[in-house]
Each structure stands twice: as C-alpha cells, then as structure tokens.
Image (cartoon, rainbow, N blue to C red):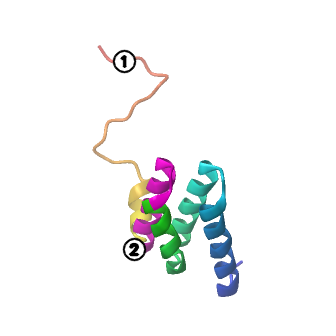
Amino acid sequence: MAITPEKQQEIVQILCKLLRDSEEPRIRAKAAVSLGKLGIELAIPELDRAASTDPDIQVRLSAIDALVLIAKPELITLMTEPSKNQNTFHINRPLAK
C-alpha cells in the first residue's frame, strides 16, 4: 500500500508539530527520527530549528541525524549495519584471558 503525496504531507505536518510542540523530549526525538526516515525535504526547516534550539541534546542529535538522512538517504544502510572491522561485545560470554 503506497502512501499518497497528500498523505505524506499530512504525516510530515503531524510529525513537525510533535517535534515543535511536544513537552516530552523522547517524543520530539522520535518525531525527528521519523522525519529523517521519510526523507521529505518539507521537514528541513523544522528539523533545522530543532537541531539548533531544542533544549534537549537527544532531540538536537536526532534532528541532525534526520537532516543528514534527508540530504544523503544512502546513509540509512550504512548507519544501520554493524561495522565489519569493529569488535563486538557479548554480555553473556566470559572475557578471554
């Protein structure tokens, strides 16, 4: 089921309102992440505002990430894949001696 452009615009408006007006930083951060995943340039001004003025650091960082994803959507795959050269930590496995 495809989302129509009109529905996308409505979704972006709702997420921008949450990013701007929610009292909960967690909700503002999630709204920013969602806007980035949608990748719609209409959200850029609101994300820019949040990135530079939101009082919560997590919201600011989420807004910055969203702006990067809108500018370079190919980074979504890179940001979600584990690094092949990075050591992993397993909490249930004893440390090697």
From the image, tell me which residue sits under label 1.
Answer: 95
In this view of the protein, can residue 12 be seen by the observer? yes
Q: Dividing the picture into quarters, in which one does residue 96 lie?
A: top left
Q: Nearer the viewer, mark 2 or mark 1?
A: 2
Examine the structure image and report whether residue 71 is included in the region drawn in magenta.
yes
What amino acid type should be assigned to the residue bearing mark 1? Leu
Q: Is 43 situated above or below 32?
A: below
Mark 2–mark 1 distance (CA, rounded to whole Å): 41 Å
| Nearer-the-camera pick, 96 or 34 | 34
| Nearer-the-camera pick, 15 or 96 | 15
For the magenta stretch, what is the residue range?
53-72
Location of residue 72 in the rendering, given as x and y in whole percent from the top left corner: 38, 72
Q: Residues within 10 Å of mark 2 (few under 14, many from 20)?
A: some
What amino acid type should be assigned to the residue bearing mark 2? Ala
Q: Is 74 situated above or below 23?
A: below
From the image, tell me which residue sits under label 2.
Answer: 71
Answer left or right for 9 relative to 45.
Answer: right
Answer left or right for 63 relative to 6.
Answer: left
Precedes in sequence: disc 2 or disc 1: 2
Location of residue 4 in the rendering, given as x and y in whole percent from the top left corner: 68, 85
